[in-house]
Amino acid sequence: MANLVRVPCLPRVPFCLQCLRAIARPDNFNLAVPFQQQYRGKKKVAKAPSTIKVKLLEDIKGYGRSGSIIAVAPGRMRNIWYPGHNAAYMTNAQLKELGDVVTERDVMFGKEEEQEKKEDEEQMVDVQMKLLPPARATEIMTAIIPPEMIFYRTPIAVQEQEAPPESPKLLKTPDIKTLLRPSKPKLIKIYGSVSTVDISEIVKSILAQDQEGVRIVLGPEDVSIVEEWEDNGIEPGRIKALGTFAVDISVKGGEVIRRTVIVKAQENSETESQE
C-alpha cells in the first residue's frame, strides 16, 4: 500500500463570481484579508502627578515665605530647588501629621517690596538731581543764616551759701594783680539744653524760606558746637548753660561757616515780648 502524504490545507481562493461578491461586501471585509496583521491596544499608564508638595527652606520671590508648604511642578523641585537647598520634599506621612497646611502660591510675594525699593531709588535719584552743589549750598547758607541765633531756656536757680566770717588776723590785703585780674563769669545752668538738633532745625527753617535754600539737606551731624567741654556749660552735642557759644555749620563737601548761638534766660524773652 502506497504511503499517503498529508498536504496542509491552505486557504483556497474562490474563483466563482458569486463568492467574490460575497467576500467584497463591507460587513465581510475581515474575511477578504484572512491573514491581516492584528495590533494590541495600548495599555493606559497612570499619569504622574502634575504637582508635588514641598516645604520652602527660604523666602522665594513669587512663591512664599520660608516654612510655607506649597504645591509646585516636580521639574522645578527636582532641577532647581532641591539641588540649591531652597526647598524640601514632603512625604504623605508628614503631610498627614501636619494636617491641611498646604497653602496657595503667593505670586506677589517679594514683588511688592521690590517695587517699593525701585520707587525709593527713583525718588532718591530725583532728590539728588535737585540737590545743590556743595559750593553753591555754602554760598547760600553764608548769605541767609544770620550771624547770631538766640535760644531761650529756663535757668536753674542756685541758692548762694554765705561764706563763714574770717578772722581779722587771716585777712590779707590783695595785691594789684589780683585786683586787675578779670573775674570769671559765673556759670548758670539751664533746664534741658540747646542741642545740635535744635540748631539744625532753626537753620532748616531759615533755609526753607529761600527758593534755593530749600534744596539744601542739613542735619544734626552737620552742626558742631565749638570747644565742647563741661566747664563752659557745653557737653558733647549740646549746650547746658546760659551764654554765648560758637557753632560750625557745613554741608558734605562744602566749607565750614561759623555762627554764634546765644542762650538767654526765659524771663528775658517774656520781658522783651511785653516791651
Image (tube, grey):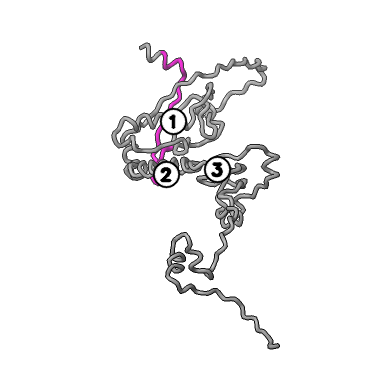
Number of residue marks: 3
- How far across and down, in percent of the image, does residue 188 sit? 53, 22
- As shown in the figure, which amino acid type bears the numbered disc 3? Gly
Q: Which mark is residue 61?
A: none
Which of disc 3 and disc 2 is earlier in sequence? Answer: 3
Q: Residues within 10 Å of mark 2 (few under 14, many from 20)?
A: few
* The magenta stretch spans residue 240: no
Q: Which mark is residue 199?
A: 1
**Residue with the mark numbered 2:** 118
**Residue with the mark numbered 3:** 64
- As shown in the figure, which amino acid type bears the numbered disc 2? Lys
- What residue appears at the point 44 percent right and 30 percent down from the top-left corner? 199
- How far across and down, in percent of the image, does residue 137 sit? 34, 41
Judged from this view, the residue extending furthest toward the front is 1
Magenta region, residue range: 248-270
Q: Residues within 10 Å of mark 3 (few under 14, many from 20)?
A: many
Judged from this view, the residue extending furthest toward the left is 211
Judged from this view, the residue extending furthest toward the top is 274
